[in-house]
Image: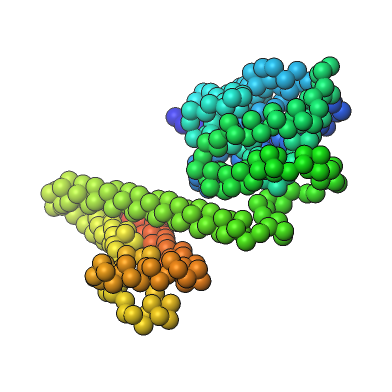
Amino acid sequence: MSTYTNYESILDDVKKFVVSYYRNRQDDRLFYHNLQHTQSVVKAVQQISTHFQLNEADRFTVLAAAWFHDYGHTGDMSNHEEKSALIAADFLKDCGLEEKVLDNITSCILATKLPQKPETLLESILCDADLFHLGSNNFMKKSKLLRKEVNALNSSKINKEQWRQKTILFLKQHEYHTDFCRLLLNAKKEENIKNLTGADYGNLNEVAEQPPQQETGRIFSAENNENRVIRGIDTMFKITSNNHQRLSNMADSKAHIMISVNAIVISLVISLLFRQIEKYHRLMIPSIMLLVINLVTIVFAILATRPVLPRGEFTSEDVKTKNVNLLFFGNFYNMQLEEYMSSMAKMMNDKEFLYESLVRDVYGQGIVLGRKYKLLRTSYNVFMFGLIVSVIAFVIAALS
């Protein structure tokens, strides 16, 4: 018999345990691998996990691993991942977690060891979160803190030029493992590489030595040039479209579940109960109620997935006034190829028209998703409350 696991409560205990450890340890040599780094990794994991819409168990797995991933870093940088994994396993062994969850937490922590070689999505999420700063505005500041820590922990010191060369090599060899981070962070990471290779690193360190600013999660600052802003906008559209597609797939999957379950119930009621209706005549009314509920549930589930197509045509006036979304197939599937290509060329040469079309496309996807989920919610509500009423009716009929 399966038991309910309160992941949020266990995660809260993990957070308290790790935070208490860091605050009580106070190793002044750890300028980088400290509580602030762990908290930033947890924040990054939350951001990436939200994109992938992980289930409760997977979300707990990667967040717990994030809290513990540098716990074993006590000044000796070698094998601290193994130490962290052992500490995490020891703390969580009596929390009532499934063996698979415990194994996944261990695997995620071990996957952060350089060079990173994650094999699963959860491992990839934690690895990308651990090096999230490589593609952020805080890269220079954190790089300086890491060099300061390395020099504090080792007898041989690394000067600025040596560190610059090592950092450039590391950045060029590094790759983010999730599509989300590649879209979100690669452009800024490339810019950080250019800053290291093309600018005076001494000046960059002076910038890094300024008072630290609170992380806001923003990728672009107010001083960004137009090209960087455009890249950020493009990334936003890609991520939003991917999220909408994922939500649409989830809605279709949920609707399929409703259709399948209720179709099975209808076939069972008709084949088993109605054959012996004379013997169980008292169950006639509850049976009909159940069939009606199943039928209504199926109808709403089908409506949620039934495609709605516009006429598939647009006019030259629509293109001239920029009042058409050429990116949605429903607006052009009845058009001739030559006319569509000519209109697309006009749109691609007009940045305002192009971005308006992208906005219309995102908005249109959102409208469709809203309709899907409203109908799907109605389907689930009818099934849930109808099933309760039907069961009550069956009980009353059986006892009467």
Q: Position of residue 45 (x, y in %)?
A: 61, 40
Can the viewer see residue 384 in this picture? no
Q: Position of residue 278 (x, y in %)?
A: 13, 52
Judge left or right: residue 210 versus residue 113: right
Can the viewer see residue 328 in this picture? yes
Q: Position of residue 188 (x, y in %)?
A: 63, 47
Residue depicted at x 71% and y 26%: 71
Image quadrant in which the C terminus is located = bottom left
298 or 284: which is nearer to us? 298
Q: Position of residue 153 (x, y in %)?
A: 81, 21
Judge left or right: residue 131 versus residue 150: left
Q: Is residue 309 above or below residue 188?
A: below
Q: Is residue 312 above or below residue 290?
A: below
Total residue callouts: 0
Q: Is residue 234 above or below residue 328?
A: above
242 or 205: which is nearer to us? 205
Residue depicted at x 57% and y 59%: 230
Image quadrant in which the N terminus is located = top left
The image quadrant that residue 368 belongs to is bottom left
